[in-house]
Amino acid sequence: MSAAREPISAPDAPAAVGPYVHAVRANGFLFCSGQIPLDPRTGELVGGGAGAQAGRCLENLAAVCQAAGATLGDAVRLTVYVTDMGSFAEVNEVYESFFESDPPARVTIGVAALPRGAQVEIDAVVALPD
């Protein structure tokens, strides 16, 4: 593995559900794998609607950022995947509470299905602090 590429494991985020790491640090950025709304203590999908699930995804991403010495506020781009575009407003409401000012760039994509039956998955690219 290149010295410019460092895998990051986050002890406070749920275990990966596949053969990947929580994130990879490279060239001043943190490339975070998608987080589905798993409770890090139980490994189970959280209940509630898409908004509650988006909140859990963002909390999990915050734990990944913290493990790399960053915060979710350092994010430069997030991708939100939803199984129902009708939940867009509900997801936005929760999302906005995490980024009250100076939010990152974002794209939202409607998908047919997500792992473990989740309604939401979110990944991030984060600029690491100097």
Image (cartoon, rainbow, N blue to C red):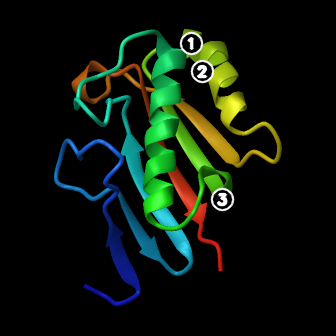
Find residue 74 and name its label. Answer: 3
Residue 40 found in image quarter: top left
Position in image of residue 64 (x %, y %): 43, 54
Disc 3 marks a residue whose amino acid type is Asp
Is 29 located above or below residue 108 in the figure?
below
Q: Earlier in the sequence, mark 3 or mark 2?
A: 3
Compute the Cα span from label 1 to label 2. 6 Å
- Looking at the rendered image, the quarter that the N terminus falls into is bottom left
Observer-nearest of 109 and 39 = 39
**Which of 75/115 is in front?**
75
Q: Which mark is residue 87?
A: 1
Amino acid type at mark 1: Ser
Q: Nearer the viewer, residue 56 or 79?
A: 56
Q: Left or right? Give the position of 58 relative to 16.
A: right
| Quarter-of-image position of residue 116 | top left
**Residue depth check, mark 3 versus mark 2: number of the one nearer the observer:** 3
Between the residue at mark 3 and the residue at mark 1, the CA separation in whole angstroms equals 26 Å
Above or below residue 128? Residue 100 is: above
Q: Residue at x 59, y 71 (%)?
A: 128
Q: Nearer the viewer, mark 1 or mark 2?
A: 2
Tag in front: 3 or 1:
3
Residue 80 in picture, x, y percent from top left: 53, 35
The numbered disc on residue 91 is 2
| Residue ranking furthest to the left | 19
Q: Amino acid at mark 2?
A: Val
